[in-house]
Amino acid sequence: MILAEIRLLRFMLVRCGVPDRDRDDVLQECLIGAVVTVREGRYRPEPGLPPRRILQRWLIGIAVHQARKYHEKADRRREVAVVDPLAYVVGRVPSPHGVVEARALLELLWLVEPRERRVLILVGEGEQVSKVARNLGPPIGTAFCYRAR
C-alpha cells in the first residue's frame, strides 16, 4: 500500500527542494518512518473518507517533515566540519580539563575537616607552611604533612 505511493513521495521531495543526489536517501527515510508508524499503531485513518486519499495526505506530511529535516542538517547549511577547530581560534583557549580537575579537587576538599581544609587552602595559595601553622594552630609537623599530600 505504502510502496504504491512512491511516485507521490518523490514528487513531494522534488517540490520541497531535495536535490536528486540525496532524494533516494530522503525517500528511504520517508518509507522507514511510515512503516514504523504503521507497525506501532500510530496510523489511524479517519473512517468514512477514501482510504487512498487519507494515505496520500499522510505520506505527504511525512515527506514534508523529512525534507525539512534534510534541509536542517549542518552540511546542508554549508557548515563544514574541521579536523582541528581550535586552529581557527585566536588567542588563548582555556583547557576544559582544568575546570574538571578543579571541581574534583573541590569535592575532595569538602571531605576534609574544616581546620585541615583551611591549612590546605592557604598552603595551596602559596602561604608558607610555618606561617599557616603559627596562625591556625596545628603543630608545624602536621601542617607540613598536609602540604606533602
Image (spheres, rainbow, N blue to C red):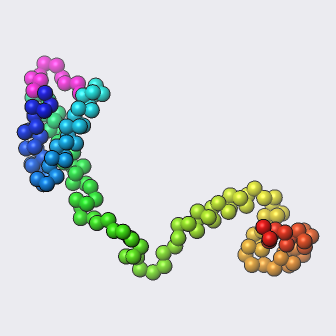
Vertical arrangement, residue 131 with respect to residue 59, above or below = below
**Residue 25 appears in the figure:** yes
Vertical arrangement, residue 70 with respect to residue 31, above or below = below
Q: Quadrant of the N terminus?
A: top left
Residue 24: % across, % down: 15, 47
Q: Which residues are magenta?
A: 43-52
Instruction: Give the main secondary structure, helix, strand or loop, of the magenta stretch.
Output: loop
Q: Quadrant of the C terminus?
A: bottom right
Q: Is residue 132 magenta?
A: no
Residue 114: % across, % down: 81, 60
Residue 69: % across, % down: 24, 49
The residue lying toward the viewer, choosing from 128 and 7, is: 7
| Residue at x-position 18% and y-position 23% | 46
Give residue 6's quadrant in the image.
top left
Residue 130: % across, % down: 87, 78
Q: Is residue 46 magenta?
A: yes
Vertical arrangement, residue 42 with respect to residue 66, above or below = above
| Residue at x-position 33% and y-position 68% | 82
| Residue at x-position 27% and y-position 32% | 36
Apparent side of residue 103 relative to residue 123 in the rendered image (left or right): left
Apparent side of residue 9 relative to residue 71 in the rendered image (left or right): left
Apparent side of residue 109 relative to residue 95 in the rendered image (left or right): right
